[in-house]
Image (cartoon, rainbow, N blue to C red):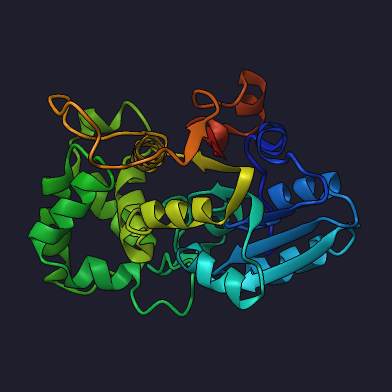
């Protein structure tokens, strides 16, 4: 299948993050290289564009798509949780800008054999990195009901989490659940018919939750943002695009933590914590225009947050 992905908030991201045309910029979620290519088009031949991705298909396609740029380019096979180590191994110690486009790509969603989609039948996989030892099938068939309930509630914010978890366990007692279509059918049986009539696809939140658990998507965000910010030049920027409230909450909280000065209790007469702000938040979250949402419905929930290194 052709690797296609419509980049969300493309112009807004490039305009917000790129400030030095001769600088070094890192796309930590390279994917189909939409954002990366747009950044590279802005850079001079002295500039450098680096792309990280754990998906080997994405890396292969992106490398080809970036080959027409005038700036220097580099692709690195790595999860962005290892961004600091990966960059320093390649001699990169300071950077002018980072972007993170979180979530799953259109290619991954639309490729049935990757197992991300509740709209297409495929194996229960959901690994962004095919070398990952944990798959969605293992989670669905091996997690205790209490743990399934927790991830569906916390990562999917699913109202019917407990009931869905119970239905999954009941179904797997008869045979292993191995296909996305099987899981969708179980979810539909678990959610009352009246509740299925309104809102998004009934399996959307459950699939999101399991995908997040497979790929440890939320666990790595805070420390990855901190690492990225520590590598920015003064005046360098970080831009993060999120697609659901959990990602956005972590992004917002991390930016707040790193843009706050003294954190001593208010009753202390002088500061003893010596905590200093290292970034300033540039603006409120940027959201897609109505026109972009109409052209690309997957952009509907996107938010871009940007911060600058002090």
From the viewer's perspective, tell me whether residue 246 is left or right of residue 241. Answer: left
Residue situated furthest top in the rendering: 290
Q: Position of residue 205 (x, y in %)?
A: 32, 44
Q: Position of residue 23 (x, y in %)?
A: 76, 52
Q: Is 77 on the left-hand or right-hand side of 66? A: left
Locate residue 20: give its quadrant: top right
The structure residue drawn at horizontal position 58% and vertical position 57%, both measured from the top left corner, is: 28
- The N terminus lies in quadrant: bottom right
Q: Is residue 76 visible?
A: yes
Note whether 4 is above or below 300 in the view shown.
Answer: below
Q: Residue at x 42, y 64 (%)?
A: 126
Q: Nearer the viewer, residue 80 or 167?
A: 80
User: Where is residue 150 shown, x and y percent of the image?
Assistant: 15, 52
Camera-side residue: 80 or 125? 80
Say whether residue 302 is visible.
no
Q: Quadrant of the C terminus?
A: top right
Q: Position of residue 87 (x, y in %)?
A: 60, 69
Q: How many marks do you count on the picture?
A: 0
Point 83% across, 63% down: residue: 72
Residue for point 71% across, 72% down: 60
Residue, far front = 270
> Does residue 248 sit above or below 228 in this rendering?
above
């Amino acid at each position: 299948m052709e690797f296609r992905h419509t980049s969300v908030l493309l112009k807004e991201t490039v305009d917000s993050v790129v400030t030095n045309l001769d600088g070094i910029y890192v796309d930590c979620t390279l994917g189909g290289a939409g954002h990366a290519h747009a950044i590279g088009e802005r850079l001079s031949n002295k500039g450098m564009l680096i792309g990280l991705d754990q998906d080997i298909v994405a890396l292969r396609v992106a490398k080809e798509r970036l080959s027409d740029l005038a700036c220097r380019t580099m692709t690195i096979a790595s999860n962005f949780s290892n961004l600091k180590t990966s960059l320093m191994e390649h001699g990169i110690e300071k950077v002018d800008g980072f972007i993170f486009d979180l979530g799953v790509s259109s290619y991954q969603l639309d490729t049935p054999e990757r197992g991300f989609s509740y709209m297409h039948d495929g194996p229960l996989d959901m690994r962004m990195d095919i070398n990952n030892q944990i798959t969605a099938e293992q989670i669905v068939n091996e997690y205790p009901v209490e743990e399934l309930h927790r991830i569906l509630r916390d990562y999917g914010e699913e109202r019917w989490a407990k009931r869905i978890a119970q239905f999954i366990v009941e179904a797997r007692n008869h045979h292993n659940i191995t296909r996305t279509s099987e899981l969708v059918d179980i979810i539909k049986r678990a959610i009352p018919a009246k509740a299925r009539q309104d809102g998004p696809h009934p399996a959307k939140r459950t699939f999101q939750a399991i995908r997040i658990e497979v790929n440890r998507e939320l666990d790595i965000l805070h420390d990855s943002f901190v690492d990225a910010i520590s590598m920015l030049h003064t005046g360098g920027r970080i831009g993060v695009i999120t697609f659901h409230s959990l990602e956005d909450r972590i992004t917002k909280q991390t930016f707040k933590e790193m843009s706050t000065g003294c954190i001593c209790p208010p009753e202390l007469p002088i500061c003893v914590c010596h905590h200093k702000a290292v970034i300033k938040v540039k603006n409120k979250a940027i959201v897609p225009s109505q026109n972009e949402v109409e052209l690309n419905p997957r952009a509907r929930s996107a938010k871009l947050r940007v911060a600058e290194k002090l």
